[in-house]
Image (tube, rainbow, N blue to C red):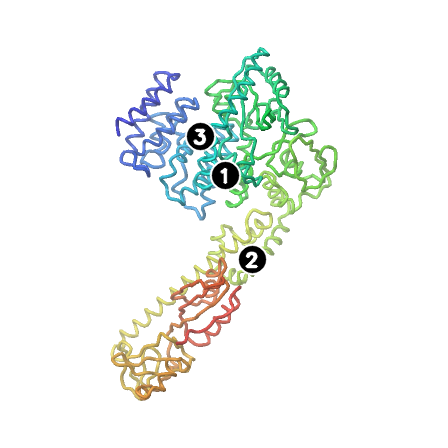
């Protein structure tokens, strides 16, 4: 294996010929350091762990990044997975390398309350590092590409989690950075694990038609090449079939079969200058019939990720539509490698400039948008902000504003400035007044109508805004301007959720409970929580659920403390009077008593146990049965076993009178059957009712019945029959419950 590792590193060195001898030596040192620190660690496929950072370094080198980036790729897991530290890496290599490694490292040693919170904090850390140095995200994307290539060795659950995260976050980030090659690979590999059947069907069909595809592309390529030569234009032409995920999305969005999708082909024409691009466009439109509405000029209006190209869709002589992309070599390098192309091809931007806020304003916006936002909403809206689908609209001054697909004038206004959004009273699109819910389309000219007397945003705007940026700015306005209104609105929302859960505010605000509740919801006071709910910084449902969880937890702890105190007291009483109490034997003059709390008539000494078939408790009419060798078994008088047993000739004389000891302080087990319509959260609602009633659950079993019903059996601890009646009444009020009964026989 060592020989293979060394050979693979030699292949890496072949890609580093443009580096100085000193830099190549530093890369070698980083490899040796990483290999020694990962010694003994294995990947899921059984290979040495060092193979992963080495492969990531290969990908980074292929992007043409500098020596520091390649070294950081080799070392990127040392701080996270070994005993290496930031200080040690900085001292041995450089502060820059250590910062790059730290930027890629996940926050593994921090405890989180949810998966979304963990994901948000890791993304926030990465975005902050990226805002300082974009190489962090380039290395991270290379890391994710190799991980997704080797995902088959993970568990099925892990495969789906990683594939979904890659598809929803890392592929869109690669798109934002213009790294199309890696974006396509991440999308295809993710689809393989998220919808393996569809992926295989599309792949098999493409393989089946491979010869036909190749013949068509060769024919079109030859036609375009011949025309360019005739016009005296120097250019390179090649074609490709669209990648699997692109086809999959089109099939899903348009509900079509693969055989019904005709624009599977894309051709690229690469020339030397911009003027020639437009010459070629004219030739293409002369050769083939253009499809109306399918021409896009990204040269005069580049995408935010710096992508430039002319796109046109045309129909060939065979009646088959295909796309033609026309660009210069510089544009081509940018389209393939994105921002990384600036290292590889040195097109007028130094590394420092690549990390500035101006170049990556969208990174700064993503960081700003996570303020005053709960983790779940941030992750959800981040996916919207990052996702590839977007629209390009113009200001009246012809400035281009890019927004997520489905964006409204509200998103446009806040993309200009928060003050414009806050003072907006209306909007015009192409000179025509439109509503706030109008969905903008690419190429439209949008004008915002403002007023100094505007009352500010409406709460309804939160539902209409598509971008996280707009929602965040609206939320901040309400937080700043409407404190009292927020508190009142938030309190009403929270109390509504609490009522829905079967609780009351009084339960949560009890003196012994409130500090625990506030700690659980992470606010210093109820008013602060109400305000956050009111302006949208917190979810009323989530806060109510957290409060309920803490209430159940505190009630359970209280029950455990009381049980421990009872046990301790009973132990002390037993130690003080060992002759009076002896493992269930009762003596009390004419009344014979048991520690079980049952007085047995006519017996001077006996063992007492409670029948499991009917679980009697004080208040129930009871009867005793003299067993052979196990003392007296106590049943409820209406227990079917007792009724039937009293009628059997051989057992009549063994049924005796027993009664409850009125002075007993014992607790007793009883069993309840509950029938309910099956639904999510049913078990939690039942346990919440029990906890609120300070009732201890000793056991619970759940069985799913036919027709969507559930049967629950609860073994609970009570003191009297009246407590049983009370808890049965409360359980009957739980949503979906239609029958609660005592187990009997």
Which element is circle 2 on?
A: helix
* Picture quarter with the N terminus: top left
* Picture quarter with the C terminus: bottom left
Which element is circle 1 on?
A: helix
Residue marked by disc 2: 497
Q: Quadrant of residue 601?
A: bottom left
Q: Is residue 535 visible?
A: yes
> Closer to the camera, 708 or 714?
708
- Verify CB contact (< 8 Å) between mark 3 and mark 1: no
Residue marked by disc 3: 136
**CA gap, disc 1 and disc 2:** 31 Å
| In-image side of 150 versus 330 (left or right) | left
Q: Residue furthest right?
A: 432
**CA gap, disc 3 and disc 1:** 19 Å
Q: Residues within 10 Å of mark 3 (few under 14, many from 20)?
A: many
> Closer to the camera, 277 or 540?
277
Residue 221 x %, y % = 53, 20
User: In the rendered view, would you say 94 is above or below 384?
Assistant: above
**Mark 3 / mark 1, whichever is N-terminal:** 3
**Mark 1 / mark 2, whichever is N-terminal:** 1
Residue 446 x %, y % = 69, 33
Residue located at (59% from left, 12% from top): 231
Residue 621 x %, y % = 41, 82
| In-image side of 604 versus 353 (left or right) | left
Which element is circle 3 on?
A: helix
Q: How many marks?
A: 3
Q: Is residue 133 visible?
A: no
Q: Residues within 10 Å of mark 1 (few under 14, many from 20)?
A: many
Residue marked by disc 1: 168
Q: Residues within 10 Å of mark 2 (few under 14, many from 20)?
A: some
**CA gap, disc 3 and disc 2:** 43 Å
């Amino acid at each position: 294996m060592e020989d293979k590792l060394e050979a693979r590193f030699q292949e890496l060195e072949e890609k580093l010929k443009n580096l100085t001898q000193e830099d190549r030596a530093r890369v070698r040192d980083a490899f040796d350091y990483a290999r020694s620190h990962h010694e003994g660690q294995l990947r899921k496929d059984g290979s040495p762990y060092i193979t992963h950072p080495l492969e990531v370094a290969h990908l980074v080198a292929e992007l043409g990044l500098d020596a520091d980036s390649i070294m950081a790729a080799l070392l990127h897991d040392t701080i996270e997975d070994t005993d290496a530290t930031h200080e040690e890496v900085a001292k041995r290599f450089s502060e820059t390398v250590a910062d790059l490694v730290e930027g890629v490292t996940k926050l593994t040693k921090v405890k989180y309350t949810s998966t979304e919170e963990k994901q948000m904090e890791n993304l926030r850390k990465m975005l902050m590092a990226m805002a300082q140095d974009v190489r962090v995200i380039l290395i991270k994307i290379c890391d994710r590409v190799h991980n997704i290539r080797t995902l088959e060795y993970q568990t099925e659950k892990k495969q789906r989690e990683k594939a979904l995260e890659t598809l929803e976050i890392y592929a869109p980030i690669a798109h934002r950075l213009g790294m199309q090659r890696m974006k396509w690979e991440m999308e295809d590999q993710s689809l393989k694990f998220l919808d393996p059947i569809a992926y295989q069907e599309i792949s098999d069909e493409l393989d089946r038609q491979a010869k036909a595809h190749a013949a068509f592309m060769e024919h079109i390529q030859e036609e375009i090449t011949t025309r360019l030569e005739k016009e005296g234009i120097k250019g390179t032409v090649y074609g490709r079939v669209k990648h699997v995920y692109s086809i999959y999305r089109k099939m899903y969005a348009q509900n079509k079969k693969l055989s019904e999708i005709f624009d599977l082909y894309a051709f690229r024409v690469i020339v030397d200058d911009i003027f020639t691009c437009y010459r070629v466009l004219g030739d293409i439109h002369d050769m083939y019939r253009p499809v109306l509405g399918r021409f896009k000029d990204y040269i005069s209006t580049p995408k935010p990720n710096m992508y430039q190209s002319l796109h046109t869709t045309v129909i060939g002589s065979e009646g088959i539509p295909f796309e033609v992309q026309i660009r210069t070599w510089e544009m081509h390098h940018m389209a393939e490698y994105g921002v990384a192309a600036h290292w590889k091809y040195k097109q007028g931007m130094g590394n420092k400039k690549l990390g500035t806020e101006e170049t990556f304003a969208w990174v700064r916006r993503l960081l700003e948008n996570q303020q005053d936002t709960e983790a779940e909403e941030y992750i959800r809206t981040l996916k919207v902000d990052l996702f590839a689908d977007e629209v390009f609209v113009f200001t009246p001054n012809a400035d281009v504003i890019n927004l997520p697909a489905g964006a409204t004038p509200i998103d446009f206004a806040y993309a200009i400035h928060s003050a414009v959004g806050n003072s907006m009273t209306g909007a015009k699109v192409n000179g025509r007044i439109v509503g706030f819910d109008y969905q903008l389309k690419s190429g439209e000219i949008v004008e915002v109508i403002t007023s100094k007397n505007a009352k500010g945003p409406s709460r309804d705007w939160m539902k209409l805004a598509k971008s996280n940026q707009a929602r965040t700015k609206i939320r901040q306005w309400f937080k700043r301007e409407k404190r009292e209104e927020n508190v009142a609105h938030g309190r009403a929302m929270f109390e509504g959720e609490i009522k829905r859960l079967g609780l009351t505010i009084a339960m949560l605000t009890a003196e012994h409970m409130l500090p625990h509740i506030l700690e659980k919801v992470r606010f210093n006071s109820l008013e602060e929580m109400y305000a956050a709910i009111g302006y949208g910084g917190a979810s009323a449902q989530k806060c109510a659920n957290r409060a309920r969880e803490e209430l159940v937890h505190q009630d359970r702890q209280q029950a455990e403390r009381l049980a421990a105190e009872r046990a301790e007291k009973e132990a002390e009483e037993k130690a003080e009077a060992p002759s009076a109490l002896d493992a269930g034997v009762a003596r009390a003059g004419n009344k014979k008593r048991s520690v079980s709390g049952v007085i047995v008539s006519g017996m001077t000494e006996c063992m007492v146990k409670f029948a499991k078939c009917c679980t009697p408790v004080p208040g129930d009419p009871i009867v005793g049965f003299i067993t052979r060798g196990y003392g007296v078994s106590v049943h409820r008088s209406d227990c079917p076993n007792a009724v039937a047993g009293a009628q059997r000739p051989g057992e009549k004389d063994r049924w005796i009178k027993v009664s409850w000891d009125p002075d007993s302080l014992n607790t007793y087990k009883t069993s309840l059957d509950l029938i309910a319509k099956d639904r999510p959260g049913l078990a939690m609602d039942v346990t919440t009712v029990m906890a609120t009633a300070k009732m201890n659950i000793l056991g619970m079993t759940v069985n799913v019945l036919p027709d969507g019903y559930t049967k629950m059996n609860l073994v609970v601890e009570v003191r009297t029959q009246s407590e049983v009646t009370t808890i049965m009444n409360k359980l009957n009020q739980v949503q979906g419950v239609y029958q609660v009964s005592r187990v009997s026989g």
